[in-house]
Amino acid sequence: MGFETTRRDFIRNTGWGIASAAAVSGLDIHGPLLRAEPIEVPSVAPTSRIRLTVNQRPYALGVEDRWTLAEVLRDHLGLTGTKVACDRGECGACTVLLEGRAVYACSYLAVWADGKEVLTVEGLAQGEQLDPLQEAFIEHDGPQCGFCTSGQLMAARALLNQVPEPTPPQVREGLAGNLCRCSNYNRYVEAVLAAAGKEGRHGK
Amino acid sequence: MASEMRSIGKPTPRIDARERVTGQARYTGDVQLPGMLYARVLRSPYPHARIVRIDVSKAKAMPGVHAILTKENCRIQWSSGDSRNKRLLFNDPVRFVGDAVAAVAASDRHTAEEALQQIVMEYEELPFVLDMEQALAPGAPEIHPGGNLSPNNEGERAPETDQRGDVERGFAEADQVFEDVYISKHHNNAQMEPRVSVAQWEGSRLTVWASTQGISNCRRDLAKDLGLPLNQVRVICQYMGGGFGNKNQCHDFDLMASALAKETGRPVKLEFTRAEDFVAVHGRWPTKQYYKVGVKKDGSLTAIRMKAYSGMGPYRKGSGGVAGAQLYRCPNVKTEVYPVYTNMAVSANYRAPSYPQGVFGIESLMDHIAHTLGINPLDFRLKNMTEKYHDEVPYSSYGLRDCVTRGAEALGWRQKWHPPASDRGAQKQGVGMAMGYFGAGLGMSSAVLKLNPDGSLQVHVAVTDIGTAAKTTMGLLGAEAMEIPFERVSVLSGDTDRAPYSVGESGSRTTNYTGYAVVTAAEDLKRQLRELAAQSWSVAADAVQYSQGAVYMQDRPDRRTAIAEILKGNPDGLIAQATTDPKLKGVSRNSFAAHFVELEVDTETGDIRILKYVAAHDSGRILNPLTAGSQVKGGVAQGVSMALREELLYDQMTGIPLNPGYYGARIVTHGDVPDVEVIFVETADPYGPYGAKSVGEPPIVPSVAAIANAVFNATGIRIKELPITRSKILDAAPGVRLEGGRA
């Protein structure tokens, strides 16, 4: 827009992007590529080959170095449950777990995730059995429009993994990086506390 | 068989909740099509400028760039982008920072973004104006021919005026006259889902996956602006990530995506960045409200006069109304609103578009008057609150007084209210209240109901559930009307190819408009069932009754025949269609609310902490207390954000917005909002389906004023310009500024 530095400008300006302009002839992508057609134009951006484990499934991928983890998950692995709402690390809609820790996938380059384990909202349930957080989100009406919900769930999962029985202030702090413009904050906090109680009882 | 409510009134999780918590819900941005291109938009860096030269040759030569649209090859009008002027997709002159000048479709979004930087634009800067009153001053830069006062509904260059009685006589009769000015700011809807549109042509037929609050209106507008017959346009929006009024109808991104897809022969996904969303779509209109109010010593009102300016930005997309005076009984009222063009971001609908800013003004002033007259603000409201619309027309149902009394009791108003600034320390506690109302209109909408041979029900409605649980509500209404379990109902929505016209998710109307059609269509299904049974039993139709999924002879209620039996051998089941357009008869129909807040102001830091919040609402009968409660809680929290945080700031020298984005807007998050206690004062409205009125927008209406009034009660400081920031508290707090070295 001319008046602001986007993350990609930043990446480019700091040399992460087009540091070397060596053209790569097509993308050498292995694993389940869900884009229906190959990219027809040889990429001018540097690429790398990485290995990722997403929701316990291993992938070997060729990626452009400038691609974010969110882009790879959404555009190339078809895991669109992870949402991109601000694309600059301000809202938390893209929160996923990386090695068990909550990260903003829009502000994390895919190449940084090489060799690491990613959990997205699609991997929360065990088959048909929903995660207690998902069940509580349904029961307590967590999602209104639902666009921030995946991020809220993943941030809550990270919190409960670390603090199994949080107090209300701990829940608010744990989710503070996740905006909800429907502003259903009361319901989300209720839901996380309910799920924590349930998990405690079942000894999870 | 007397039927009690089976589905209505019980807390019911959303019909699509599982999809929403598992990542399966497919929003517009999740749509990926074979061969799809990505599009990005280039925008004006100047608030007002003529375009001298456009050179796209370098961008067009880039590998991966498929098409570029500018004003030179695209003259498509965006008709719902301006109700007064001819607004194109690409305008010259550009009239605000963020006005679109080009759109690029490329093989991926990075290439599209890089191509934007290769487009050469030369502008000739024109004088610009940001302030509403300056825009009306003689010699101000003219944003559209004819001046900066936007024409009213009659097409005249005159304010929107509403009056009754004679305000001058009212002021003459007053014991005391109060005059004051209240100011609200432009702030963005900031819904979580960004702007995105995916367009695909198959021959001459266009399909648009839109992020819209109304697929029916979106389709109508797309067809109109692209010159297509309606049967060649399909709009799909299955899941919608919020809008709060800025995704009504069709938007420029839908048209741009469609035009690029046509040009390239490929599907196109057009995305806006978050910063574009903040400056290039629209937010709530800023207002400056001048009041003059006459009162008797006993607190009764003799006259209310309001003259207000609303900054619409350079295109007229919203009404610019300033509501609030209707909250009070008063024989002499005159309101004049001037919608003004400026070179700021466009302003239009944001949740209860005319209300929270107007109510902030009138309810702050009434609070001030009560305080000055030595009347408890609660008693002042109980004495003066509206009981009839314009003191004349009865309300179809009325729960405002109960909202006020029950809300006050829940907060403990009588115990907690004290004269302003009673606390002696730096931490000062106080309570505040405000009333609110919102029109609960009726109007035309349609529904198709299909009763399958197994007795399950499909509700076809062109609803896009923007977060209000409208899909769920439509299902509940279908279940209730057919007296069958909610689990037997599915709702097919969000696709113009499989649902008839619906009004769209705006104006808190879906339950009242489309819900009414669902119930009416269900009545028709029951009639058809009775007739089928009567035929096969060779009796008169009125001898057959229906209840709870079965028909029976009136005199044999114990011998029931299930739907499945009646529809045996009828593979298509039964279909009923209803288009309804109910009219009010001699009444005004409104939802009401009263909010009560207790908070603490730290006069050394300016920090405001909300301790208790009670929101009492009359939204008629509550169809689903779970999701209606969420609407209220969320609306209040948005109001907190509007009251304390949000304003799109502008550099006055360049006309450039300074803080587009969530971080800059300082939107509230988990730690910033109070637990909201919700009270539903249920009135059974005779017009709504099962007595329902509107619930979506009212919760934001009184919240801003209630907080402002509580700040006054705590500190004695009356903030008259939103938002109520720390610095405004500190500037106004006498003798409590941090001393040097104490920080």
Image (cartoon, coloured by chain):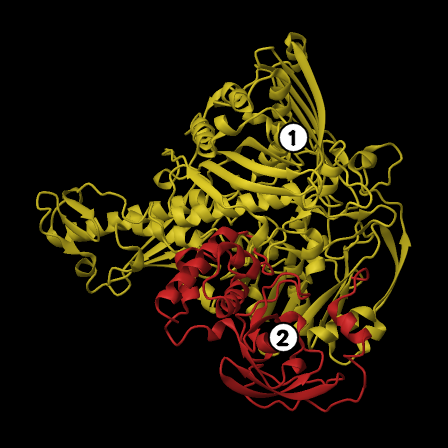
Q: Which amino acid type corresponds to the residue marked 1 in the rendered image?
A: Arg
Q: Residue furthest front?
A: B741
| Quadrant of the snapshot with the N terminus of chain A | bottom right
Question: Label 2 belongs to which residue?
Answer: A71
Is residue B193 among what the camera can see? yes
Q: Which amino acid type corresponds to the residue marked 2 in the rendered image?
A: Glu
Looking at the rendered image, the disc whose residue lies closer to the viewer, 1 or 2, is 1
Residue B340 is situated, as x and y percent measured from the top left of the image, at: 75, 37
Numbered disc 1: secondary structure: loop
Instruction: Give the CA distance from mark 1 to mark 2.
Output: 55 Å
Return the mark for residue B424. 1
Above or below A166: residue B309 = above
Please determine if labels 1 and 2 lie on a single subunit.
no
| Chain hosting mark 2 | A
Residue at x 54%, y 56% (from the top left corner) = A172
Which chain is displayed in yellow in the rendered image? B
Which chain is displayed in red in the rendered image? A
Question: CB under 8 Å between callouts 1 and 2?
Answer: no
In-front residue for pair B1/B646: B646
Above or below B248: residue B151 = above
| Quadrant of the snapshot with the C terminus of chain A | bottom left
| Chain hosting mark 1 | B
Residue at x 44%, y 65% (from the top left corner) = A133
Total labels drawn: 2
In-front residue for pair B46/A188: A188
For the residue carrying disc 2, how many other residues have a C-alpha within 10 Å: few (<14), some (14-19), or many (20+)? many
Residue at x 71%, y 46% (from the top left corner) = B647
In-front residue for pair B734/B329: B734
For the residue carrying disc 1, how many other residues have a C-alpha within 10 Å: few (<14), some (14-19), or many (20+)? few
Numbered disc 2: secondary structure: helix
